[in-house]
Image (cartoon, helix red, strand yellow):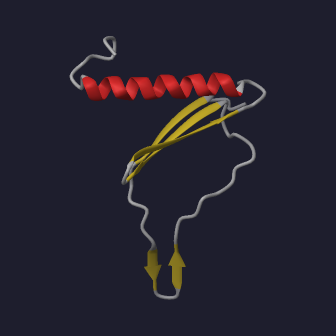
Amino acid sequence: RNPLFDTMFALQNTENVEIQLPGLHLSTYASEEIVSKFDLSLDVTEIEEGLEYLFEYATALYKTETVEKLAAHYLQLLESILRNPSATIAEL
């Protein structure tokens, strides 16, 4: 377990561009993680169609059904923000 924190949220809102330097070519690629780095993490990436999100979690601590419920609650929160962007966090 991580000694500083056990839950992480990351918003990836940078362009995924290929970088080319003389004699060097860099590009992004999807990696297949086998072990979760944190108890629970949520990575959200901006794509042309909207947002793509990925939950990664420790299966020893969370059931799949629990994470699916968290994902549904997160989606509900985003929809509430879109319906009422001036709402306070308490109202949402």
Residue 50 or 25: which is nearer the viewer?
50
Residue at the image position 53 percent from the left and 82 percent from the top: 24
Left or right side of 80 for 44: right
Image vertical order of residue 52 relative to residue 74, above or below: below
Residue with the most extreme bottom position: 23
Residue 87 locus on image (x, y percent): 25, 18
Q: Quadrant of residue 31?
A: bottom right
- The quarter in which the N terminus is drawn is top right
Residue at the image position 33 percent from the left and 17 percent from the top: 89
Residue at the image position 70 percent from the left and 40 percent from the top: 36
Q: Quadrant of residue 40?
A: top right
Residue with the most extreme top position: 90
Residue at the image position 68 percent from the left and 32 percent from the top: 2
Left or right side of 67 for 21: left
Residue with the most extreme left position: 86
Residue 92 locus on image (x, y percent): 34, 16
Left or right side of 16 for 2: right
Residue 33 locus on image (x, y percent): 70, 50
Residue 70 locus on image (x, y percent): 55, 24
Count of numbered circles on the image: 0
